[in-house]
């Protein structure tokens, strides 16, 4: 209840300007020339000091990308993207890779502090660094709205435009044997692991955007949890697009070895700009026998202004491979940002008795367009999956759930439950549901249900009759609507998300 | 225009057949031009492949390898007894009877006793020969390649009208009989209209005579228009054991305060594709659509449904049930569209499949496309094998496993058949469905 109250207050306190992360950081950056060709791919690879096989891998992806066509099947309408008019690499000057916090440009730290991610404070609170140590200027005195105030520790990999600027808590994690670093660093330090797993879940030519990402990805996070280890803290990556006309292409690779567990959080923001910016990420998760990966996203890229101008085009390929028996992968996503969202976090349930879960809240307002959902591919025996999707469309937005549940011929005993509900706020928005069910095995048991409705007048009347304003009443009902999904978010994100929901729906009534 | 060359053998055959038959197909004046335009529309797209979203699960380009020649006039006369025997339980139905043999209206076999002041009935072929201007508007079709092919090749069909506020009292049984001893292709077009306040129970029965060859191709389009306040029960039954390919399209338009109850029983064609397009054109209308699809062996049955809520205050219900045995593949695609101003829409859809064999396949794509906010819409889809608990319950009460399975399967299908309003028709179709289940 307290959290709901908070949401209501948050909604009240918000001004016309709804996107609070829309500032820009004045920082000198180093860019690759505009456009895309093999030289750019070579440039990026060289900048990263990658081994030769990696360059070949990238070039192969680039050549495949040239042969692919942009997908048009999604219910999304946007101007054609000129892939030759983008910067494919941009890094804050002087940063070649993650280093210790002391060396990080104070302006960068300030940016993250403003976003509510006080990297510095986290370390101090956790006792890694002594409190008396000189801290970069303007670091916030308390982490009131960041994760630092939370009890648990969170290790953060901060990605700014194309590069990872810092990764915290590396030493503590190393003690447990967990590798958590930027993917560029992993390529240098652990090339054998990267080579073994990279592209095994999302191959280079998987789709247009994945191929593009494979060719030009600049950074991202790498996680390896060794057998039997339960990762001692939440891992987190914070993505920030800052530079103009740049695309952000990050690549995340998480491997949970036998019997291990890891929970990973991802957050994203971008400045407010009139033009659209491209973000095409690839995330690969691999869970071996008895391992579990929990992946949570709060996606809050800049959604564009009230007239639909600007905003991020978000084309993301996320896929988890339950490679081992009894493994489990769980996706939880809160999608409130981006002008265009094209994203289908999926699970390949290859190992016997493996389990995939997908919990999603997708909120669209203004002129946002969301086409998101999941794929559950049942290949092993007795595999189970669960999909809970809550879409909320307001303003003039279009919100689509698109999902596939399939059982292979040998997937005896496959079981799926899907529930997708959509809520419509206002008569100019649209909510669509496009599920595919494909059962090739008679013992598969699939259940799918979907509903679409508006907030019932009775509920609103009941709330307003008890003295809530109509906006408070809507926030209350919406928070109730998404409760099933909220419960699956890590504590840190839950409170944040409730606020975000209020903010995203600001101005949708009246 | 986006012209793709016709690549497959079947596409080439269709083109050749059209060129050869164009002169002899019924119709003069604008009819020839209409057919030629439809053929061009087909030539532009070719047969739909799985790359066409609506045909994702039924790759007609791949599956339709060989197109049999258009049916010619049957040499062997068909008797009323032949028809009765093919109709099975539907033969005893007290109904007005219209019979088409191999796609051609048969005046001898048809028996319509209703007054001309109630029902107006004409053979489409006869009217195409006269080609009155008003008829042209009836073919304003843009609903895809199958309908275009139908328009190009249509040989006959019926034009049926129920006059204002009239009720024929008895159902109208429209028999599509297949009799040709060589495999052949037929294209039939029926145009049914109910004027304001009219009532009609229309049963389309697709049957094959004992003598009929296998491997036939049927393309049947039935357009039904309901005037304000009209009520129509439209039932289609396809029980065809002779390995035919069946492409059927319903285009139904509902006026204000109209009621449409539809039911489709599809059992054992080699390949069937049932396209159902429903448009709400007037407020306050109701739709109740249901069906059962039964397949075994390598059979393939696809039901693709589009319900378009173009106006406010309408209600739609759909329930489709399938039983799949052998290596059969059952498909249900159901799309509910709610247009921007169609407030107060109430739409519910359910599709369920029961899989009797490990190799059976079910694909489902229920879809909601909603642009208005004050609506209540939902869909559900399930697929599973027979519930082990239910089976155990039956067996613990002394019912042998085979019978228990049959009982559970019959009751599963029964739920859909129950939706048929007319008792005699319900019983006849129930008998047909159970007959199919027991034959397995």
Image (cartoon, rainbow, N blue to C red):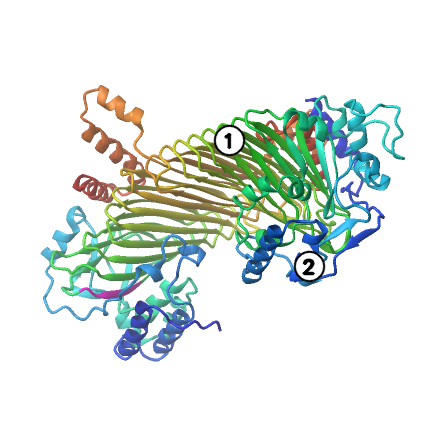
Residue in view at x 57 percent, y 49 percent: B371
Query: What chain does badge 1 belong to?
Result: A
Residue B280 higher or lower than A137, as above or below: below
Q: How far across and down, in percent of the image, does residue A222 sit? A: 64, 38
Q: Would you say A306 lies left or right of B372 here?
A: right
Work out how far the residue at label 1 is from the one at label 2, CA to CA, in angstroms.
Answer: 38 Å
Element type where label 1 sits in the image: strand
Per the picture, the main secondary structure of the magenta-coloured stretch is strand
Disc on res. A40:
2
Q: Which residues fall within the magenta stretch?
A: B183-189
Element type where label 2 sits in the image: helix
Give whichever of B419, A60 is nearer the camera: A60
Q: Is residue A131 magenta?
A: no
The C terminus of chain A sits in image quarter: top right
Residue in view at x 72 percent, y 31 percent: A469
Mark closer to the observer (1, 2)? 2
Give whichever of B341, A107 is nearer the camera: A107
- Residue that sits furthest to the top in the current view: B396
Asked if residue A36 shows in the view, the reply is: no
Residue A219 higher or lower than A136, as above or below: below
Query: What chain does badge 2 belong to?
Result: A
Q: How far across and down, in percent of the image, does residue A490 sit? A: 64, 27
Give whichever of B341, A265 is nearer the camera: A265
Q: How far across and down, in percent of the image, does residue B256 sit? A: 46, 52
């Amino acid at each position: 209840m307290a959290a709901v109250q908070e949401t209501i207050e948050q909604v009240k306190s918000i001004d016309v300007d709804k996107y609070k992360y829309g500032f820009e950081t004045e920082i000198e950056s180093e860019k690759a020339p505009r456009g895309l060709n093999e030289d750019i791919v070579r440039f990026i690879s060289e900048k990263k000091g990658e081994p030769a096989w990696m360059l070949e891998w990238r070039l192969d992806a680039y050549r495949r990308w040239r042969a692919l066509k942009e997908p048009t099947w999604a219910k999304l309408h946007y101007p054609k993207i000129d892939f030759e008019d983008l910067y494919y690499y941009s890094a804050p000057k002087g940063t070649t890779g993650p280093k210790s916090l002391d060396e990080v440009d104070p302006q960068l730290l300030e940016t993250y502090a403003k976003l509510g991610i006080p990297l510095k404070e986290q370390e101090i609170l956790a006792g890694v660094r002594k409190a008396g140590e000189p801290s970069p200027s303007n670091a916030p005195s308390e982490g009131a709205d960041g994760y630092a105030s939370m009890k648990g520790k969170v290790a953060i990999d901060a990605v700014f435009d194309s590069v990872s600027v810092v990764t915290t808590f590396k030493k503590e994690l190393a003690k447990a044997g967990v590798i958590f670093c930027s993917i560029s660093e992993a390529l240098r330090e652990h090339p054998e692991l990267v080579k073994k797993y990279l592209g095994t879940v999302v191959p280079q030519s998987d789709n247009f955007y994945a191929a593009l990402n494979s060719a030009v990805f600049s950074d991202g996070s790498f996680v390896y949890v060794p057998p039997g280890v339960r990762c001692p803290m939440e891992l987190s990556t914070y993505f920030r697009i800052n530079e103009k006309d740049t695309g952000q292409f990050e690549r995340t690779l998480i491997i949970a070895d036998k019997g291990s567990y890891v929970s990973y959080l991802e957050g994203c923001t971008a400045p407010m700009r009139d033009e659209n910016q491209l973000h095409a990420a690839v995330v690969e998760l691999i869970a071996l026998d008895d391992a579990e990966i929990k992946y949570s996203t709060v996606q809050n890229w800049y959604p564009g202004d009230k007239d639909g101008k600007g905003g991020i085009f978000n084309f993301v390929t996320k896929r988890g491979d339950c490679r081992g028996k009894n493994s489990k992968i769980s996706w939880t996503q809160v999608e409130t940002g981006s002008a265009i969202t094209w994203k289908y976090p999926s699970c390949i349930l290859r190992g016997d008795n493996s389990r995939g879960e997908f919990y999603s809240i997708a909120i669209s307002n203004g002129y946002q367009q969301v086409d998101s959902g999941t794929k559950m591919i049942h290949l092993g025996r007795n595999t189970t999956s669960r999909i809970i999707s809550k879409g909320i469309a307001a303003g003039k937005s279009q919100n689509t759930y698109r999902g596939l549940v399939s059982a292979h011929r040998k997937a005896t005993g496959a079981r799926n439950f899907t529930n997708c509900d959509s809520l419509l706020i206002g008569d100019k928005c649209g909510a669509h549901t496009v599920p595919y069910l494909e059962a090739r095995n008679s013992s598969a048991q699939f259940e799918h249900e979907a509903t679409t409705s508006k907030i019932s007048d009775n509920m609103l009347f009941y709330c307003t009759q008890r003295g809530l304003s109509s906006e408070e009443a809507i926030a209350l009902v919406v928070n109730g609507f998404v409760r099933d999904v909220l419960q699956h978010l890590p504590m840190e994100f839950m409170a944040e998300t409730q606020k975000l929901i209020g903010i995203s729906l600001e101005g949708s009534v009246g | 225009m986006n012209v793709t060359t016709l690549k497959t053998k079947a596409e080439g055959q269709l083109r050749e057949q059209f060129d050869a038959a164009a002169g002899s197909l019924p119709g003069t004046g604008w009819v020839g031009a209409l057919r030629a335009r439809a053929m061009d529309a087909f030539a532009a797209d070719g047969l739909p492949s799985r790359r066409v979203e609506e045909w994702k699960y039924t790759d007609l380009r791949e599956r339709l390898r060989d197109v049999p020649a258009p049916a010619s006039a049957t040499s062997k006369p068909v008797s009323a007894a032949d028809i009765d025997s093919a109709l099975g339980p539907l033969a005893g139905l007290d109904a007005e009877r219209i019979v088409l043999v191999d796609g051609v209206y048969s005046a001898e076999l048809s028996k319509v006793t209703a007054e001309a002041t109630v029902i107006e009935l004409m053979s489409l072929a006869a009217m195409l020969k006269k080609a009155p201007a008003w008829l042209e508007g009836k073919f304003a079709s843009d609903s895809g390649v199958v309908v275009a092919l139908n328009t190009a090749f249509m040989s006959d069909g019926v034009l049926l009208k129920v006059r204002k506020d009239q009720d024929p009292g008895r159902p109208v049984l429209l028999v599509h009989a297949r009799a040709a001893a060589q495999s052949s292709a037929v294209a039939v077009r029926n145009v049914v209209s109910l004027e304001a306040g009219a009532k009609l129970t229309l049963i389309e029965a697709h049957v094959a005579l004992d003598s009929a060859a296998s491997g036939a191709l049927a393309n049947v389009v039935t357009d039904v228009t309901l005037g304000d306040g009209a009520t129509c029960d439209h039932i289609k039954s396809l029980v065809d054991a002779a390995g035919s390919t069946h492409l059927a399209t319903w285009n139904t338009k509902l006026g204000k305060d109209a009621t449409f109850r539809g039911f489709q029983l599809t059992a054992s064609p080699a390949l069937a594709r049932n396209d159902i397009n429903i448009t709400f054109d007037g407020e306050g209308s109701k739709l109740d659509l249901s069906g059962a699809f039964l397949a075994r062996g390598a059979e393939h049955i696809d039901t693709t449904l589009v319900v378009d809520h173009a106006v406010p205050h309408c209600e739609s219900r759909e329930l489709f049930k399938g039983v799949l045995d052998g290596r059969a593949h059952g498909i249900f695609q159901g799309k509910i569209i709610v247009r921007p101003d169609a407030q107060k829409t109430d739409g519910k859809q359910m599709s369920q499949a029961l899989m009797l064999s490990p190799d059976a396949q079910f694909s489902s794509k229920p879809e909601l496309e909603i642009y208005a906010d004050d609506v209540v819409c939902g869909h559900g889809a399930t697929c599973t094998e027979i519930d082990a608990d239910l089976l155990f319950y039956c067996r613990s009460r002394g019912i042998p496993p085979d019978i228990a399975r049959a009982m559970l399967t019959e009751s599963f299908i029964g739920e859909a058949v129950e939706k048929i309003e007319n008792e005699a028709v319900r019983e006849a179709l129930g008998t047909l469905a159970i007959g199919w289940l027991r034959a397995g």
